């Protein structure tokens, strides 16, 4: 397994992972915003989520809340 060596690459991989999981679950950015509100991230909007995932720059809190909102049971490092 080859791990990223730069912060930007970690962000890109995390973003790609979330986008792929959203696609698998057939969840739109608007759907994710609604789900995140149920997990306590009340200020997240469709546009905000789109920009975060496009930039690949977000907090661990956002990432973990997305994992919970997408109802993922686990995250395998090799998949990121």
Image (cartoon, rainbow, N blue to C red):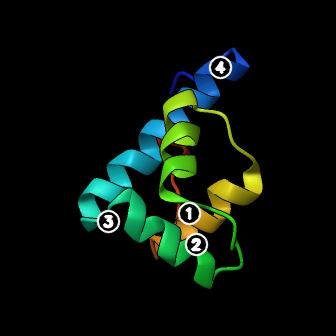
The tag earlier along the polypeptide, 4 or 3, is: 4
Residue annotated with mark 2: 36
Residue 66 figure quarter: bottom right
Q: Residue furthest top?
A: 5
Q: Position of residue 56 (x, y in %)?
A: 58, 32
Q: Which mark is residue 66?
A: 1
Residue 16 place in picture, x, y as percent: 43, 37
Image position of 74 with respect to 59: above or below: below
Instruction: Kindly state the secondary structure of the residue where label 4 is placed.
Output: helix
Among numbered discs 1 and 3, the one appearing first in the sequence: 3
Front position in the image: 36 or 6: 36
- Which residue sits at x=58%, y=40%? 52
> Element type at marker 2?
helix
Would you name the residue on which mark 3 appears?
A: 27
Disc 1, disc 2: CB below 8 Å?
yes
Mark 2 vs mark 4, foreground winner is: 2
Q: Which residue is mark 4?
A: 8
Residue 48 appears in the rendering:
yes
């Amino acid at each position: 397994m080859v791990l990223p060596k730069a912060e930007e690459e970690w962000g890109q991989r995390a973003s790609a992972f979330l986008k792929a999981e959203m696609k698998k679950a057939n969840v739109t950015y608007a759907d994710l915003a609604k789900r995140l509100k149920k997990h306590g991230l009340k200020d997240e909007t469709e546009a905000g989520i789109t920009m975060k995932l496009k930039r690949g720059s977000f907090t661990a809190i956002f990432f973990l809340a997305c994992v919970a909102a997408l109802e993922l049971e686990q995250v395998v490092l090799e998949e990121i």
